[in-house]
């Protein structure tokens, strides 16, 4: 993409319209290969960065999987049992839904359908069980997420920042959820792809991908927010310049709508996905400040204890504060992002806000999965990647998050809750 396009914030184009055309405006036989070469030249850095980051992650997780068994003397794991150690927590729900459907347990509708549906479709053609199909699907979606993270960031801030943002995303303490049998990588891949197409002005494609994201998890519906903002920005914030293609935004929540119709016909309750959350002690929306107050009260009551519940709340409070700081710096101060990246900041902000409004409401940490949900907020990693221009910050961040991720991987493999 040209520097002029980046500076102006206009959507980049593949090629000038006259390249590969004869005087009559017809495409010449040489045009298609030329366009392919141009496209590969643009995408090559993203594909290579995403691929090698992904390969490095897979190698690290394979090593951690076997090393995690060393502290358990007397245990003689086999390749099969070590592999199966990743089969736990939400993975159980996705694979059972893929095999048996939603009627086997009343809490099942809390898990959106696209990911288990893909497992069910691909299981007959992939080796192993539905669990193995889920791992393969998630790992491939993680690869796409890595590629799109680089591509989206490089569009605005160049290759160096994009490489760090891609690596920082996977290196985050819960980055391993992007390659295991959870729907995290599918949601991130769909969201980043949709956001990229929004910047390109490809509204139909962006909306269709957003619809798939809304069938993956509730957070996919939030893509309507950046869609509206970026559409208005590209049309100079003028209501007079809005065209019929703006209606594509109505397609974005279609995945959720179709799921609600299914739940209504199958269970007589279109909101069964929300009501099923009570199985995890979530009983409806709460103001975000109420969630933070609840987390702080648990810490205050048990101080100076750093038992599991207190530690989780301390970490959650720190993560919320850090996320708020990064989002603020994204729009104000010397580190603020380019104006045309406002839609990315808005999406990241509502993504962070969503779990704050749906806390666990029992005597437990109210934000148990917050580490994981931050993977869906790209601006957080883009901001960290900007700070990574400083050598000291880059080394400290890398060492800390990879060390913590190693601990969390080991914890997960020993069947303890992580996020």
Image: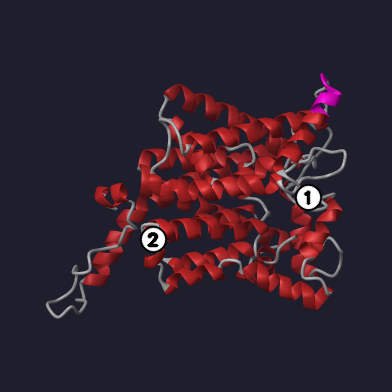
Is 240 drawn above or below residue 61 in the view shown?
Answer: below
In the rendered image, the quadrant that contains the C terminus is top right
Instruction: Give the SS element for disc 2.
Output: loop
Question: In this view of the protein, can residue 193 be seen by the observer?
Answer: no
Question: In this view of the protein, can residue 59 be seen by the observer?
Answer: yes
Residue position marked by numbered label 1 in the rendering: 89
Instruction: Give the SS element for disc 1.
Output: loop
- Dominant SS type (magenta): helix
CB atoms of marks 1 and 2 within 8 Å: no
Total labels drawn = 2
- Percent position (x, y) of residue 417? 78, 41
Please tell me how crowded label 2 is: few (under 14), some (14-19), or many (20+) other residues with Cα within 10 Å.
few
Residue 267 placement, left or right of 122: right
- Percent position (x, y) of residue 145? 52, 52
Could you say which quadrant of the image residue 375 lies in?
Answer: top right
Instruction: Examine the structure image and report whether residue 13 is included in the region drawn in magenta.
Output: no
Separation of marks 1 and 2 at Cα, in angstroms? 48 Å
Residue position marked by numbered label 2 in the rendering: 238
**Comparing marks 1 and 2, which lies closer to the viewer?**
2
Please tell me how crowded label 1 is: few (under 14), some (14-19), or many (20+) other residues with Cα within 10 Å.
some
Residue 100 placement, left or right of 407: right
What residue is drawn where x is 43% and y is 31%?
A: 333
The answer to which of marks 1 and 2 sits earlier in the sequence is 1
Residue 350 placement, left or right of 273: left
Could you say which quadrant of the image residue 31 lies in?
Answer: bottom left
Q: Give the farthest residue toward the top.
A: 304
- Which span of residues is magenta-colored? 298-304
Residue 265 placement, left or right of 204: right
């Amino acid at each position: 993409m040209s520097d002029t396009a980046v500076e102006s914030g206009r959507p980049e184009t593949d090629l000038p319209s006259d390249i590969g055309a004869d005087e009559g405006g017809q495409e010449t036989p040489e045009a298609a290969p030329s366009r392919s070469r141009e496209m590969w030249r643009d995408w090559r850095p993203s594909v290579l960065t995403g691929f090698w980051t992904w390969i490095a992650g897979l190698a690290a997780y394979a090593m951690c999987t076997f090393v995690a068994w060393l502290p358990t003397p007397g245990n003689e794991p086999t390749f099969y049992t070590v592999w199966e150690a990743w089969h736990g927590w939400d993975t159980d729900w996705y694979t059972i839904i893929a095999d048996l459907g939603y009627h086997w347990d009343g809490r099942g509708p809390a898990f959106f359908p696209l990911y288990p549906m893909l497992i069910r479709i691909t299981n007959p053609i992939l080796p192993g069980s539905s669990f193995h199909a889920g791992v393969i699907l998630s790992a491939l979606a993680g690869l796409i997420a890595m590629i799109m993270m680089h591509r989206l960031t490089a569009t605005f801030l160049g290759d160096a920042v994009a490489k760090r943002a891609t690596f920082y995303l996977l290196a985050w303490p819960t980055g391993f959820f992007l390659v295991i049998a959870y729907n995290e990588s599918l949601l991130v891949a769909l969201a980043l792809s949709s956001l990229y197409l929004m910047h390109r002005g490809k509204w139909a494609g962006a909306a269709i991908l957003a619809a798939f994201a809304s069938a993956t998890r509730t957070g996919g519906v939030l893509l309507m927010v950046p869609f509206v903002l970026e559409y208005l920005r590209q049309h100079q914030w003028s209501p007079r310049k809005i065209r019929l293609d703006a209606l594509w935004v109505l397609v974005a929540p279609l995945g959720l709508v179709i799921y609600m119709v299914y739940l209504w016909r199958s269970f007589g309750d279109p909101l069964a996905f929300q009501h099923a959350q009570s199985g995890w002690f979530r009983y409806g929306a709460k103001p975000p400040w109420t969630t933070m107050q609840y987390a702080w009260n648990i810490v205050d009551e048990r101080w100076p204890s750093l038992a599991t519940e207190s530690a989780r709340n301390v970490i959650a409070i720190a993560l919320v504060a850090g996320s708020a700081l990064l989002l603020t710096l994204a729009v104000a101060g010397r580190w603020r992002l380019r104006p045309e990246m406002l839609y990315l900041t808005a999406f990241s902000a509502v993504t962070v806000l969503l779990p704050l409004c749906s806390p666990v409401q029992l005597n437990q940490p109210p934000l148990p999965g917050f580490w994981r949900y931050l993977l869906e907020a790209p601006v957080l990693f883009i901001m960290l990647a900007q700070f990574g221009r400083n050598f000291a910050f880059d080394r400290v961040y890398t060492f800390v998050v990879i060390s913590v991720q190693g601990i969390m991987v080991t914890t997960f493999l020993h069947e303890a809750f992580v996020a």
